[in-house]
Amino acid sequence: MKLRYNFRVYPNAPQRQALAQAFGCARVVWNDCLRARMVAYEAGLPYVSSKDLSKEHITQAKRTPDRAWLADVSAVVLQQSLRDLDSAFKNFFDSAGGRSKGRKMAPPRYKSKKDFRQSIRLTRNAFSLTSNGCLYVAKVGNLKVKWSRALPAAPSSLTVVRDPAGRYFTSFVVDTEPESLSEVDTEVGIDLGLTTFAVLSDGTRIGSPEFLRRAERKLKRSQRDLSRKAKGSKNHAKARVKLPKQHARVSDRRRDWHHKVSTRIIRDNQAVYVENLAVSALGRTRVAKSVHDAGWASFVSMLEYKAAKHSRHFGKIGRFVPTSQVCSTCGHKDGPKPLHIRQWTCSNCQTVHDRDENAAINTLAAGRADRLNACGAPVGPGVIPAQRDETGSHHGGHQTAEGIPGRQAAGGYVNSSP
């Protein structure tokens, strides 16, 4: 399976300038190639191939006065920008033709130099890990990397990102084998909520930290300070940087907390089942801020990839399964209930249920039923009661390898991961 490993990098002033130039050149190639295809489409001409775009807007463009500065960055950056555009068009065509699942995708759009997030993508022949622990990027130099763990294998590609807060990160794509954990007998169903972030079928309740709500006062103050500054002034530029930094702190805390909770759930259970929530639809309701603050989508995504990484089972039940309406004791469907009702009594067996815990138990039962059905086991009808590889030359002759460069022990690289 392919995994991404993200690390913070600290470029110096000349390297920041070189990266800014690389971001701009990649953006220009994207926009030029996109414009060529859009013009051809509007004129009724055939779809412009990548080969023709590369020849005209990269190779020949470098020889023109208007685009001569494209030669100042690595050619790999420009070619990868064109490949990313091809992938965006392919995803759009697959979505429009019904060949891909999920929401309909919009066609590619032009990129702006005013975008807060900038990135470039590189293949293995344009970067390498040096023996002193630095990351060499073609025509940028040796970047200082804050290694927090070892790479389990040689990376196949690299993405350098500048986030809205002005921080720089590298993202390595690594092809690794699953790390199986010892098998356990427990399985769990999860009911996600807002006041209580998650209720497990075993009765465990995980409170919602509400990172956005807690930081709301600082965010409002930063936004107010930005709106009061005159556009184009130096004070406006300073305030424009402070606001993304506040948002970055919120997202970093939420992501760290999601990682800790999802890892604990995956380690303690052999199978995990959740409801397939329509998060994008809930994000347009009156509880939109709380939904986005909870971050259900990213949390479920972490559960899914960590289950695959550690050979655990992960399953989603249908979003229309009435987990909150069915009694987990006798299977009687008691009808819909308003959100303010947190406890209810079954009209058939008189069992008193906690709404969230009952939903988690029903999620576990429905997930087990779906899993058995997918394996070919008989499942009766009715309500179920609860129970990439490239080669190239490398700077200084150092080959890209696994582990942390410059930190070797007797048996190889030191693995600093927890």
Image (cartoon, rainbow, N blue to C red):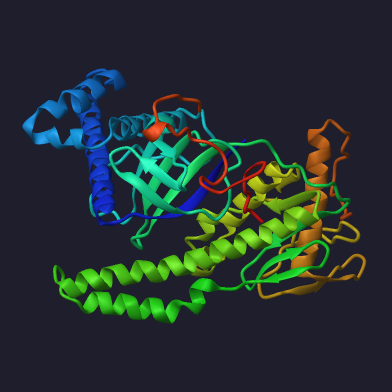
Residue 204 drawn at (x, y percent): 78, 68
Rendering quarter of residue 55: top left
Please state if 61 lies on the left or on the right of 85 as rendered.
left
Q: Is residue 197 above or below residue 98?
A: below
Rendering quarter of residue 186: bottom right
Tell me the residue at 55%/49% (across/down): 407
Tell me the residue at 91%/71% (across/down): 350
Residue 221 drawn at (x, y percent): 34, 81
Q: Quadrant of the N terminus?
A: top right
Please state if 47 lies on the left or on the right of 323 as rendered.
left
Between residues 219 and 405, which one lies in front from this camera angle? 405
Tell me the residue at 81%/59% (across/down): 361
Number of callouts in the render? Answer: 0
In this view, which residue lies farthest toward the left? Answer: 65
In this view, which residue lies farthest toward the front? Answer: 410
Please state if 383 lies on the left or on the right of 282 as rendered.
right
Q: Is residue 112 visible?
A: no
Rendering quarter of residue 48: top left
Q: Is residue 242 above or below residue 70?
A: below
Q: Is residue 276 visible?
A: yes
Q: Quadrant of the C terminus?
A: bottom right
Residue 403 drawn at (x, y percent): 57, 43
Please state if 329 lies on the left or on the right of 11 as rendered.
right
Residue 88 drawn at (x, y percent): 38, 34
Q: Is residue 349 above or below residue 315?
A: below
